[in-house]
Structure formats: C-alpha cells, structure tokens
Image (cartoon, helix red, strand yellow):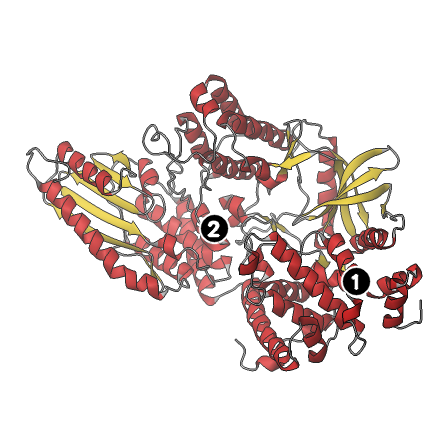
Amino acid sequence: MPAAPDSAPEPAVTAPRLAPLELERLRGAVRAGLFATPALLPRLGRYTLLRCIGHGGMGIVYAARDEELGREVAIKLLRAELADDEGGRLTREARALARLAHPNVVAVFDVGIHDGQRFIAMELVSGEDLRRWLAAPRPLREVLRVFAAAGRGLAAAHAVGLVHRDFKPDNVLVGDDGRPRVLDFGLARPPDATDTAAAPPVLPRGVDPFATTFTSTGVLLGTPAYMAPEQYLGEPADARSDQFSFAVALYHAVYGERPFAGDDPQSLALSIVRGRVRPVTPRYPVPPWLEALLGQSLRVDADGRFASMDALVDVLDAGLERGDAAVLDALPTRAFVAGPRPTGTGALAVFDGFTGAVPLAAAPSERALAVPTSTAVALPPEAEHGAAITSVSTRRSLPHAISEAALGRMTLELDRVSDRRGKVTRVGTGLIWSTRALEVHVDVDAAGTRVLVWRRLAPALRRRRASLGVLGLFFGALSITLAEAMGLLSGGFEGPIVLGLLGVGVAMGIHVADEHHERALPARRAELEFLADRLMQLAAAREAPLAPDG
Amino acid sequence: MDARDDRSLLDAWAAGDRDAGEALFARYFEAVVRFFQNKLSRDHDDLIQQTFLGCLEGRARFRGDGSFRAFLFGVAHNVLGKHLRGRYREPTALDLAHVSFAELGDSPSLLIAADQKQLAMLTALRRIPVDHQVALELHYWEGMTAAELAEVLALPVGTAKTRLRRAKQLLAAELADLEAGLTGAEPTATRLDTWAAGIRRQVDRAP
C-alpha cells in the first residue's frame, strides 16, 4: 500500500477507446430496439455482421453474411493487440490453414484487416464447444471418439506445418452433427523462438489458468492449465506441445480431474514442468491402454511422447476397436461417484524417467514406479513453504527386513483407517500406500526397514493464491527438478534436493498460513505419530496370526 | 444536434417525440457502453437498451435538481446490479461492495487499451469490488464529482467521498501488484535463474 493513497493514481483520466466496429454494431442494435428503426448492420469488407455470437480471449465472434457468396460465415475479429503481424507470419499461417480442408478443422475462408483489427472468416458451426459438451455425462466411448476426431484434426494441421499452441476444449467445436472441429490455429504470434536465451514467460499474477494468455504486446503464451512444459520454459512449441495439451484435456475428460494440481499459474507451472501428475482414483476402471497413452503423452520430455498426433490417435482408435465394451459403453465419465474399485495398481505408471524416482510433492506413488528399486527418497521431514507448513511427516525404522506378511498387515491396517480408499503400489521389496492426502512409504532391503508416513496439508491451503506474481521465480523451482535429476544421476546425492526444496520454499513462500491451519498442526502431527507407531507394531510383530481390528 | 437540454429531450421522448429520444440516445450512448464494457463480456445490447428505457420509465424520479447524467448512470447501476443478481444462484449473497468482477469470473472486456499502462489500469479496476470500480470509472472517465457519485450510487455525499478514497487505495494496491508481475524480475528470481541455467548445462552434458 502506498504511503500517500490520496495522491495515488490519476493516470486513467482518459477513458479507453471502444472497438469501433463493435460500437457501431451495438449502436445499430440498441437503436433498433429503442426506436423500432431497421437495424443498420455494420459491414466488414464483403461481410455484413448479423449478430454477436461470442466473446473470448482472442476477440469477438460474429455471425455474418458473405454478401458475395450469399452464405453465412463466422467472423472472428481479433483484439487490437493481435493485429501486429511482423513478417507476415500470421497471414502465412492463415493461408496455410485456408488451404487445409479437413473434416475436423474449422474451415477458414478468408483473412483480412479492418480498421487495424485482423479478422478471420470461417465456417459457421452450429453446436457447442467441447468444454460444454463434456459437461454432460457421456459414455467413455463417445468421449474417446470425439477426442480421436479432434486429434485427427490437429494431426492434419501438423502435417501442413501448423502448430496450434493453445489447444483446449474451448477451442474445439462439436457440431450438432456430432463432428468435432478444432479452431483457432496460429491466430497469434508465438514467443520469439529465434532468441537463443529463451526465458520462461512472465505471467502476471492472477491470470485465469483457463484463459488464453497473451503478453501485453500480443504474443500468445497459451492457456496455463494446458500449456506444455516447454511452453512454460519459453522454448518453441511444436506439434508435441499440442499433443501434451490434448492429453491434459483428455485426462480431464477421462478422470474428471485435471492431471496437474494448481489453481494459479505459478503452482500449475510447478506441477507441469516437474511432471507431477496428481494421483486420481478413477471412478471406474480406466482401461490400462488409455492410462498408458495418457502417461506417454503427458511426459515432460517431448521426445518421450508419441512421435505424432497420428500415432497417438492410432492407439486411441485401436483401443476403441478392441476395448472392453462394458467399460466403454456403460460408464458415464462424469457423475459416476461410487463404483467398482479401479483395476490394476498405479493409475499412470511411467510419466517421465527424468523426474522419475523422486516422490517429492504431488504424486509419489506413480513417480516411483518409473525406477522400481527403492522408495527411499529424500522426502523432507516437513516441507515448509515459507510460513506455511504444507505437509507433516514422520519416520520409523527397523534394523531388519520385514516379511511380506508384515507388509500385508500394514496395508490392511492402512486400508482400515482410511476406509479402503488407499492405493498400493509395489516398489521393489517395499511398497507405497497412498491416498490423496496420506502416504506411507515402506522401504525394505537387507539393511533394514524404513517407514515414512507423510501427510499433505496443501489442500487446506490451496485457496490461498500465491501472491508472487513472477513466473520467472518458477524457474527457481524448475531447478529443483533439475537438481533432483542431478541427485539421481550422481547416485542419490541429497544436497541438490535439499537446495531444491529451498527453492520451493522461495517460490511458494508467500503462502501465508492462516491461524486455523497453524492451530490444527499439532493435532495432525499427533495423528501421524500415532499411525506410525501402530504401523511399526504391526511391522515388528513376529509372524503370529493377527486380528485385523486388533 | 438537438440543442434542447436533457430534461426537455426526455420529456419530449416520453410524449412520443422519437427524434428527441434519438438525440438523447446519441448524446449518452457511448458513455453507457463504456459503463458496461469493462464489467461484462456479453449482454451489452440488452443492458444498454434497458438503461435507456429505464430512464424513460423512471423519469418521475428525475426531478431536475440533479444532472441527467447522474440519473442515467444511477439507472445503469441498478440495471447492472439486477443483471448480476439474476445471473448468480444466491442473489442475496452477492455483495457488490465486496466482490470484484475478477472474482465473479467474467472474461476480459473489449476495450482497447492505448498502452500497457492503461491495460494494467483496466485489469486493476476489474479486481476491486464492483461498487468501487463503478465509482472510480465514473470519476475518472466521466469526470463525475463526489456529489454526482452520491446520486448515482444512492449514498450520502460523505459516504460517496469515502468510497472514492477507499477505491483509489484499493486500485493503487492492485496496480502495485500488477506492476510487480508485469515487470518481472524479483531479485531472487534472477539468482535462481542463473543457478538453474548452470545446473541445466550440467544435465545436458550428462549421459
């Protein structure tokens, strides 16, 4: 807060300008309504604007009549900041798109400039966007078919050298005919890819993670919730970045939750660049091939993803072909709450070898599967994010290895206290048991048995937005990922990991613990200690028969 | 341009003089558009029309001792409030003195910002509570005095003054935050950047 608020800002004395064409259209429309005069419809070249059918991050969309060809089209009038087309790149891309005829891409007829604003004339599709379409309960088969078709549309554009850079359900129209069409290819300038010292983009604080985001100069950054790691890193986006965004949308549609946690761009960036897909307990048995497909296409390392969208869609099609009809047809993807327990273990097995075996923050159980050797990880005793403690943990150890039966007893107990909500992942001779909030790592080898009980408190804090406005800082957190990798490469060296945690502390440090949270901490710790003691009793017990509820 | 004053135009329009209505409409149309543009992303047509019709219907309440402009924006303000309450499930719980458009989740406006500074200003305005945003926009863009604002917002003049002062403080805070975000570099960020870049090079070299 500035010291002298009364002398504070007076710079906006001049009112902002209104988009001239929209002003003209509004004037005509309101005048017609008030005075029963015939509406004077504004013209834009050969097009007469009939009505406004949408506003979005990119601009205004009108239904218009092409007076030369006598057909109705959609006109997207881009925001003024997006008019700048240095080097004619956008025009070139629009032309490439205009030449592209594919049933799953919205057809572009024409591009032009009107009063300094760029516009695109395209196919007028009667239907709804994929986001709204997905809001209704749909059988998995139907969802996958629509995604497969949209994927073919992306692939067709990739084939002519176009990259979307902002694929998300809002940019897919599902026509009344059921046919999905991808829209908004290459409408805005991408970050400068020729800059060798590519820097992570700076997202202003409070950016809506679901809105298409631009810099103030009209450079397209993407939509935070769907951006690929390389986009967060300021590296050029390519077809594989579209694949990643596609997979984020598909994951959400299949599991009913987004793969990456975070309600603000900063924490999203952290989750995405580190490949932290959060554990989701599916509400129905997700076919293993679909899990694997999502796992591969959500890899941090673009080289590890599918070679092309076509390759991905081939897998999708094949799965649809031979998939279990009971799963594909019977179960709605939404509104399916209580159901059979998921088949198989770990929902998404291997996401990225790079961030592989370091269960640090969000999704340890899946992570650890990548390198199935040991669960012994450099988990901090307590992850302190600045003032707020976001997790509590406790450790126990035994000087000897424990038996399978002991592991079984521990699992049984955990299932009991958690009302059977936990998921077991076997890792080497140990296991990880996890729910969304609680994790128990049991590491068994010749040297002994180590147990770590870890509880996340982050959900309680999630509502508090990070007040750090700088995505640049997030780069510091990226370094943790790299440090982890280094730690792994040099055989479990913990130093970088600790440093990395400090990085997290800095990046997230502005989460302010509220008093309630603080008060609840001792109780949470006590619960955890109690649970750990109980588990150790079970682990240490000789192979005597055991009553589960004992 | 019709030379008659606002009051005469309104009365003439009410008596069936369409030209008078059109003249009044032409005079205030853009200001009314501006009123709604930085707040809502759609339904402008309807709301603008409702505002003008509201003036016509409620002209008995316009006694001529205040400015027509204040009366007009008072109507627009009511139209806005009614619209917002109609859109949300718990209308009574919607307190426009405390909730901002940014929190209401409306998408960005279509105003054209002259430069980055103005863009930041528009964004910041959308992040302060609706009632404060209304006061500030009318003050800055339409040059309204606290007395006129009191009329628009149906508040005592003293309260309107306080509202304006508070709104400026809130705006300054939001602008400061935006500034920090837009210009980027926190000192720690730079340091971590360098550090991360160093590690990255090592990783790249690793087998």
How far is the residue under mark 2 from the one under mark 1? 53 Å
At which x and y percent is residue B173? 55, 71
Q: Residue at x 47, y 67 (%)?
A: B187
Disc 2, disc 1: CB below 8 Å?
no
At which x and y percent is residue B38? 68, 60
> A265 or A286: which is nearer to us?
A286
With A84 as the anchor, is A524 left or right in this view? left
With A520 as the anchor, is B98 left or right in this view? right
Q: Is residue A336 above or below residue A465?
A: above
Q: Is residue A485 above or below residue A158?
A: below
Q: Where is the C terminus of chain A found, in terms of image quarters?
A: top left
Per the image, the residue denoted by label 1 is: B57
> B73 or A266: which is nearer to us?
B73
- Residue A282, disc: none
Q: Residue at x 26, y 42 (%)?
A: A418
> B100 or A231: which is nearer to us?
B100
At which x and y percent is residue B159? 61, 79
Q: Residues within 10 Å of mark 2 (few under 14, many from 20)?
A: many
Q: Callout 1: helix, strand or loop?
A: helix
Q: Would residue A17 be visible to someone looking at this image?
A: no
Q: Chain of mark 1?
A: B
Q: Would residue B28 be visible to someone looking at this image?
A: yes
At which x and y percent is residue B53? 79, 59
Type of amino acid at the residue the image marks with label 1:
Glu
Q: Chain of mark 2?
A: A
Residue furthest to the top in view is A322
Per the image, the residue denoted by label 2 is: A269
